[in-house]
Image: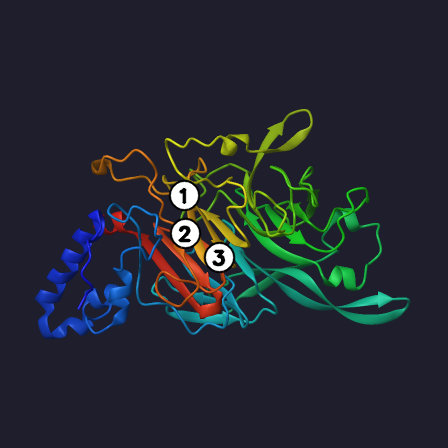
């Protein structure tokens, strides 16, 4: 039996429809779509889904919240990222490489890629996977094997015969390092932590590492590299301080996303070159930064901080993206490319999924009939394996009003929809 509790404004209609479904199917309930979404009456998951306060104890549960979509996709080995491509296939990175699934969760194939951590795709359907590669480096005339950060570029990744187009290896893909020596173990410590494709097929690449001397001719290890459509490096984003906290810094980058995402097509795509950068350094006050990109005819591309996000309008929301120390260890970020413009962040230490508007307000828009004027907080999480809990979540994606979370410690991919969207 379900626990006795007040159902939310939107969940009530959804639950009513589910009960009607059960009544129609009778003895065939186990095979019904109701079971697919909610489980059976003997399934404890049903109770957890509808337990009030499971999303966030301070959220307005009588109005709207996120609801898990079942079944859970499991049988992964510590998944680190999830991405739904322009080809409408789902890509998941874990200890085995990158898995290719359809939207029902059926696995099509696994492409072995060493150390795979992040995955994305551009409009040409080229798939980019962040991983590692073993490379022989000449050291005083002696070849030494080094394990280095790499970007694997694949074509036809959703076919039976994917093609590896390119492998970009640190530091050889960094224009600023063309005249500097290999740094041995220091270069081995460098990690690629995020990638964001742009409308012109270029991309940003976030990295972190131990060498961050701003007076050096080479780019700091804590940086965002800029790549052209032909995958050649065009330098790095200037002005991101690798060691001081501010509205324009890059302190141990841990994630990166742009404003484009499927199912956008060539016509009507978002031309913005802005990006959201996550920082994992403890001393970083704002660990999710929105960096603006503008073109100046005289000097080229300019990058600036998004000052509007520090203007807290407490008549519209109670918490904000730029609230100091809102996060502990943000691991991934994505922006909904639809009319909602919602921004999602997963925090691997707080074991939580956070949701914000494009203005930096935490929460979702209240239903028109609710009478509310403030954003309704819908962030949720906490350590555990329940449907509203995570264990070191490391990746987040959004596709057609569904949020996907790579729940690393629980070896699963979770999916969520807003309860208000269930009535669409």
Q: Which residue is labeled 1 in the image?
A: 342
Give how far across and how far down residue 150 sits, in percent.
66, 61
Give how far apart the Cα atoms at labels 1 and 2 are: 9 Å
SS under mark 1: loop
Residue extending furthest toward the top:
298
SS under mark 3: loop
Do tag 1 and tag 2 residues touch (Cβ < 8 Å)? yes
In the image, residue 142 above or below residue 60:
below
Task: Name the one closer to the observer, 205 or 305.
Answer: 305
Total tally of numbered discs in the picture: 3
In the image, residue 258 above or below residue 1:
above
SS under mark 2: strand
Give how far across and how far down residue 68 sits, in percent.
32, 59
Give me the disc on residue 398. Answer: 2
Give how far across and how far down residue 164 sits, in percent.
59, 64
Task: Name the one closer to the observer, 115 or 387.
Answer: 387
Q: Residue at x 40, y 57 (%)?
A: 381
Give me the disc on residue 277. Answer: none
Do tag 3 and tag 2 residues touch (Cβ < 8 Å)? no
Q: Which residue is labeled 3 in the image?
A: 350
Mark nearest the camera among 1 and 2 is 1
Give how far apart the Cα atoms at labels 3 and 2 are: 21 Å
Query: Sequence order check: which comes first, mark 1 or mark 3?
Result: 1
Quadrant occupied by the N terminus? bottom left
Query: Sequence order check: which comes first, mark 3 or mark 2?
Result: 3
Query: Sequence order check: which comes first, mark 1 or mark 2?
Result: 1
Give how far apart the Cα atoms at labels 1 and 3 are: 20 Å
Residue 83 appearing in the image:
no
Mark nearest the camera among 3 and 2 is 3
């Amino acid at each position: 039996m379900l626990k006795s509790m007040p159902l939310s404004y939107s969940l009530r209609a959804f639950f009513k429809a589910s009960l009607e479904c059960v009544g129609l199917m009778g003895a065939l309930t186990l095979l019904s779509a109701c079971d697919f979404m909610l489980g059976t009456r003997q399934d404890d998951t049903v109770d957890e889904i509808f337990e009030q306060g499971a999303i966030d104890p301070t959220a307005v549960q009588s109005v709207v919240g996120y609801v898990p979509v079942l079944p859970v996709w499991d049988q992964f080995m510590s998944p680190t990222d999830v991405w739904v491509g322009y080809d409408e296939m789902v890509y998941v990175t874990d200890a085995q490489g990158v898995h290719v699934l359809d939207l029902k969760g059926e696995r099509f194939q696994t492409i072995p890629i060493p150390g795979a951590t992040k995955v994305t795709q551009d409009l040409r359907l080229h798939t980019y996977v962040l991983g590692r590669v073993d490379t022989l480096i000449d050291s005083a005339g002696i070849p030494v094997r080094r394990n280095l950060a790499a970007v694997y570029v694949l074509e036809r990744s959703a076919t039976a015969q994917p093609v590896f187009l390119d492998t970009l290896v640190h530091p050889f893909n960094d224009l600023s390092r063309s005249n500097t020596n290999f740094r041995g173990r220091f270069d081995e410590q460098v990690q690629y932590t995020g990638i964001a494709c742009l409308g012109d097929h270029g991309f940003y690449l976030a990295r972190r590492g131990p060498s961050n001397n701003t007076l050096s001719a080479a780019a700091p290890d804590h940086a965002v590299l800029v790549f052209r459509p032909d995958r050649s490096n065009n330098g790095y984003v200037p002005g991101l301080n690798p060691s001081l906290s501010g509205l324009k810094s890059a302190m141990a980058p841990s994630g990166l996303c742009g404003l484009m995402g499927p199912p956008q097509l060539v016509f009507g795509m978002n031309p913005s070159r802005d990006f959201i950068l996550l920082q994992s350094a403890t001393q970083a006050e704002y660990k999710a930064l929105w960096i603006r990109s503008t073109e100046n005819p005289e000097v080229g591309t300019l990058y600036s901080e998004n000052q509007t996000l520090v203007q807290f309008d407490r008549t519209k929301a109670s918490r904000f993206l730029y609230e100091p120390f809102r996060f502990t260890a943000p691991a991934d970020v994505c922006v909904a490319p639809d009319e909602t413009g919602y921004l999602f962040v997963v925090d691997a230490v707080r074991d939580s999924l956070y949701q914000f508007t494009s203005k930096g307000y935490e929460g979702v828009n209240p239903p028109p009939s609710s009478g509310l004027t403030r954003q309704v907080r819908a962030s949720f999480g906490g350590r555990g394996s329940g449907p509203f809990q995570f264990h070191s979540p490391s990746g987040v994606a959004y596709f057609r009003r569904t949020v996907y979370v790579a729940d690393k410690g629980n070896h699963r991919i979770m999916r969520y929809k807003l309860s208000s969207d269930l009535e669409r």
